[in-house]
Image (cartoon, rainbow, N blue to C red):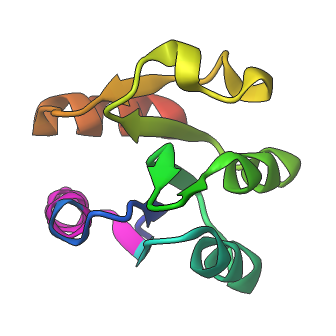
Amino acid sequence: MASKVLVVDDEALLALDIEAILEQAGYEVVGPAANVASAMKLIDGGSIDAAILDLNLAQERSDDIADRLSELSVPFFFLTGYSAEHLPPSHAHREMIRKPFRERQLLHKLGELLS
């Protein structure tokens, strides 16, 4: 059975690109979610094996999503245009990929999370 990966990004075209990359690699995509409320509904609505989070979602940050995933022991990493010092202090230890990213880089990081 394919691993379920939550994608959280407010840039619709980028979220669709990530979704296509993941599906082509055999993952089942949950979402994508463009804001905190929709991401939380997806998290609470079913099992998720891993997540990829953008740090900034329009007028919001994904800190609460990261906290909820941590509570549930769901592995995740940030995919963001920001540098590491912008990560929430409670998640400063988390893995991060900077945008723009390479497909290989994304899949490698996700594979590490799920292994």
In the visual, does 49 lie left or right of 53? right
Residue 98 lies, in percent from the top left, at 30, 26
Q: State the image quarter where residue 29 is shown.
A: bottom left
Q: Residue at x 26, y 37 (%)?
A: 106
Q: Is residue 24 magenta?
A: yes
Q: Is residue 40 above or below residue 107?
A: below
In the visual, does 62 lie left or right of 52? right
Residue 35 lies, in percent from the top left, at 53, 71
| Residue 115 appears anywhere in the view | no
- Viewer-proximal residue, 40 or 83? 83
Q: Is residue 41 above or below residue 28?
A: below
Q: Residue at x 67, y 18 (%)?
A: 92
Q: Is residue 105 magenta?
A: no
Q: Residue at x 44, y 28 (%)?
A: 112
**Magenta highlight: main SS:** helix
Q: Which residues are magenta?
A: 15-29
